[in-house]
Image (tube, rainbow, N blue to C red):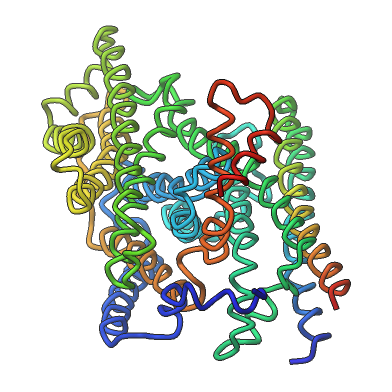
Amino acid sequence: MKDRTVYIIQLITLSFNWILAVSVTWWFIHLVTVADELNDTQTASLSISIVAITVFWILAGVLSYVFFSLHKHDEEAE
Amino acid sequence: MSYQDLHDEDEALFRPIYETSRSFYVVVIVLTAVFLFGVGCYIHQLFYGLGATGMNEPVSWAFYIVDFVFFIGISHAGTLISAILRLSKAEWRRPITRMAEVITGIVLAIGGLHPVIDLGRPDRILHLFERGRLQSPLLWDLTSVTAYFTASTIYLYVPMIPDIALLRDRGGKLQNLYRILAWGYKGTPKQKHALERAINILMVMVIPIAVSVHTIIAWIFGMTLQPGWHSTIFGPYFVVGAIYSGIAALVIVMIVFRKIFHFEDYLKEIHFKYLGTLLLVVSLLWTYFTFAEYLTTFYGHEPAEMRVFLYKFAGGYAPFFWLMVFCNFLLPVIILSNKKTKTIPGILVASIGVVLGMWLERLIIIIPTLANPRLPYPTGIYIPSVTEIGIFAAGMSAFILGFMGFSKLFPLISIWETKEGRQHSVHEVSVRLREYLPGQREESGVEASVKAEL
């Protein structure tokens, strides 16, 4: 398999994590909107959303940091 | 010594990937048959609805939710224990962490499916995405389990990258897969630094996520006003129980795979003794929580609470309750507090007892409360159907199959961490020990004296 193909596959797998983070964010925004429509209390919705969204974004960020750091230093080594 | 040359020393850790015995295939065939039987049971349930189960009114949550709480509890074996041991720089963690993390990944996937199975109509899960209420603990649970699964998978994968790179450099089967997964890792100091930094961030993140998962599962019960569930200590009680069953499951897995793959040189008696001590401590903590929970109920003597209490202590669920007390308290305490019985077989017996006891604990928490609700219903009866037992058996086989499958692709013991321990730990631990001692003021002074001695 060519190096370029390997790199593209790696990028695709990494992007799944970002898709998850973005989906969770979108879903939570949708649920907060629903809560607003139903006149539900917003305190719980907002606090849970903020915590959950942050966790998923940090996780995706850490994984991306590892990916790009390893590739950057791999090229430097070569 | 170059990065690629390092692998020979730990050849035994690569062996399970390249060598497969005939008995391995036999076990896979048997487990696959059990798994397929479970799948058949689920298809039967899809056609006939939840009437195929033993659930009824008022017992509307049963085996599936018991298994869900049980499997998620076991998942605390991994990431939490591994993160705590890494964070506390416990050197004996090195051959343990990988197995612990694999357990987490597999059981979370299995456990997370159980609420969907319990729905009867799996398509109804979509309602949660469309019209879920963030005020509901059920939704908190879905979020925390997903976050835990994501964090655990990343936490399993990132420390595995150096080992995957070793497999890539060895060549042979599945080389393209290892090339993709190794992310270009060559073992340069800068790459090691980046990896270490990521592992440090992850291990700090994973602990609160893991604690939140089981706390929220406890809140699904604790937030209701049902007798036997409405308790302020349910969160920490569930977390302690999860860690307890997690350690026990980890010990069982370690002993079994140590025997199968001849890891005696890596998983030594000392590892099991330490884990045995941890098991004993958590056993006492679990007993304390259980005692506090039931004493408060008994002292209050509220009629609805007492119905559930007596149902557990002297009613239909008394045999299960007392068996749970035996498995979770008497058996481990007797075995693990005695030097003569705190051997590998003894610790195995105690761990099997704890896993059984913790499953019974989940059963005892869920069913007696539903069978004796606060509303004036007659006492409910629940007998699990073949469908439910079949799906539980499928879950267990999926766990073992998942673990066996993992052992064929990746090393079950972290090779780079073992090497790192061999090369640096003796020095590091010596420096750390000297720092604790009186008369040693500065780290640099200690380091110089240790270097001189070495």
Image height check: is B232 above or below A55? above
Residue at 62% x, 39% y: name it: B449
Residue nearest the observer in this picture, B342 or B224:
B342
Which quarter of the image is occupied by the N terminus of chain B?
bottom right
Q: Residue at x 22, y 21 (%)?
A: B307
In the rendering, at what x and y percent does residue A5 appear? 79, 86
Q: How many marks?
A: 0
Residue B189 as seen in the image, left or right of residue B213 = right
Single out the residue that lies furthest toward the front.
B452
Q: Residue at x 79, y 39 (%)?
A: A33
Q: Residue at x 20, y 43 (%)?
A: B342
Does residue A28 appear left or right of residue B248 in this picture?
Answer: right
Residue B191 visible in image: yes
Tell me, yes or no, if residue B109 can be seen here.
Answer: no
Residue B75, image x, y percentages: 45, 50
Q: Is residue B337 left or right of residue B450?
A: left
**Left or right: where does residue A73 sit relative to residue B400?**
right
Q: Give how far across and how far down residue B111 sits, in percent.
A: 44, 54
| Residue B87 found in image quarter | top right
Residue B130 lies, with reference to residue A1, above or below; the image says: above
Where does the image place residue B257, in percent across and percent down from the top left?
33, 66
